[in-house]
């Protein structure tokens, strides 16, 4: 009698297919920032009819400007993230922050919940207010070029 | 008589050695909750709940939007989950009371571990003030700068 535990051809084929599809799916993860940026673009269009597209230059300026409108300890993004998004940053409590640049930290900006959490916290800390969808999209677009 | 005396002194010596070992035994149960490790550990080392009383953790978790000058707000579900874990495992989480309850009066709600009498006594004489100014240390909240296994709850390496 044939044991049910014996691997059959279909088992092996299924395992093979599974690994191939998993491997093929991996490179697409590198671009999974795009749906999040697209989401912000749709919100931006709703708020501003004239919105065309996000600008990495505006994103760069948002990142580098010394706003000084939030908490005194964090006048700008660069207070913790350093002047270049390619560098490791450091929190006020001394913990290392992985680079913001997507080229350095490929899984950055791939989870909407996490992205929203940090915009909520850090826009308040630096700007003293929440960020607009255009600012968020500009910021992410800039980080994609880095 | 002489034998009794030397036996007594041996017992007394052993007692002193053991009590000094007990003082050096700075080990805490590591955090066993993934959400707590991840969320608390995003900006600083995730401190073990045994280092503050229940009332302190409640106050900290209810004031995350201004967390020592930082907006550390979380969604309600996540912060409730973390609060329950920290309160359940707090310094006064069992009848014995942890080391961190020593010298903490009933009317005191310390918000910084570094302000508790136990922390102050453990670091006071031993750590020179220049060590705190070292750029690798940066802040007293950075336990791992000196206690390499702090994340795993071991502070015995001093």
Image (cartoon, coloured by chain):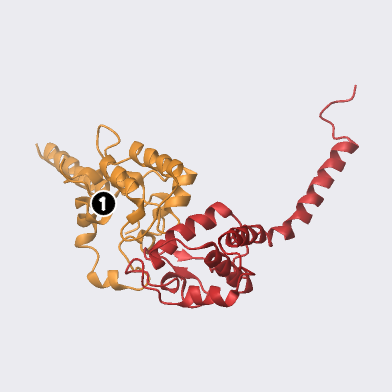
Chain colours: A red, B orange
Quick check: B62 above or below B148?
above
Which residue is situated farthest in the top direction here?
A1
- Placement of the N terminus of chain A among the 4 image quadrants: top right
Residue B18 seen: no
| Number of residues whose C-alpha sits closer than 10 Å to that of mark 1, classed few (under 14), some (14–19) or many (20 or more) | some
Q: Residue at x 32, y 65 (%)?
A: B139
Name the spot of residue B24 as percent of width and height, x first: 28, 51
Numbered label tally = 1
Q: Residue at x 48, y 55 (%)?
A: A117
Q: Secondary structure at mark 1?
A: loop
Name the spot of residue B100 as percent of width and height, x first: 25, 46
Name the spot of residue A32 as percent of width and height, x first: 67, 58
Pointer 1 residue: B111
In front here: B14 or A66? A66
Q: Quadrant of residue B138?
A: bottom left
In front here: B113 or B7? B113
In front here: A106 or B134? A106
Q: Residue at x 19, y 44 (%)?
A: B102
Residue A46 vs residue B88: left or right? Answer: right
In front here: B55 or B103? B55
Quick check: A46 above or below B27?
below
Residue A15 seen: yes
Q: Quadrant of residue B146?
A: bottom left
Pointer 1 chain = B
Name the spot of residue B66 as percent of width and height, x first: 33, 56
- Placement of the C terminus of chain A among the 4 image quadrants: bottom right
Residue B138 vs residue B120: left or right? Answer: right
Which residue is situated farthest in the front direction here?
A49
């Amino acid at each position: 009698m044939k044991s049910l535990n014996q691997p059959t051809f279909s088992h092996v084929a299924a395992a093979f297919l599974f690994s191939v599809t998993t491997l093929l799916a991996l490179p697409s993860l590198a671009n999974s920032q795009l749906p999040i940026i697209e989401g912000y673009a749709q919100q931006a269009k709703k708020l501003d009819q004239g919105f065309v597209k996000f600008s990495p230059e505006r994103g760069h300026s948002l990142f580098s400007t010394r706003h000084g409108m939030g908490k005194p300890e964090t006048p700008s993004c660069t207070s913790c993230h350093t002047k270049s998004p390619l560098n490791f940053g450091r929190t006020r409590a001394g913990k290392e922050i992985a680079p913001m640049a997507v080229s350095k930290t490929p899984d950055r900006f791939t989870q909407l919940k996490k992205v929203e959490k940090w915009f909520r916290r850090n826009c308040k800390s630096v700007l003293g207010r929440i960020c607009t969808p255009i600012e968020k999209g500009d910021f992410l677009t800039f980080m994609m070029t880095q | 008589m002489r034998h009794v005396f030397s036996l007594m002194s041996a017992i007394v010596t052993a007692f002193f050695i053991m009590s000094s070992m007990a003082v050096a035994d700075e080990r805490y149960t590591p955090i066993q909750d993934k959400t707590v490790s991840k969320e608390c550990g995003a900006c600083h080392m995730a401190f073990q709940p045994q280092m503050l009383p229940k009332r302190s953790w409640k106050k900290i978790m209810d004031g995350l939007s201004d967390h020592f000058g930082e907006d550390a707000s979380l969604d309600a579900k996540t912060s409730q989950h973390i609060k329950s874990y920290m309160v359940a495992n707090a310094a006064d989480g069992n009848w014995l009371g942890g080391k961190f309850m020593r010298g903490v009066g009933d009317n005191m709600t310390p918000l910084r571990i570094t302000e508790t009498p136990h922390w102050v006594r453990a670091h006071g004489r031993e750590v020179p003030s220049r060590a705190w100014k070292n750029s690798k240390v940066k802040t007293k909240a950075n336990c791992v700068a000196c206690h390499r296994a702090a994340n795993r709850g071991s502070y015995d390496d001093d």
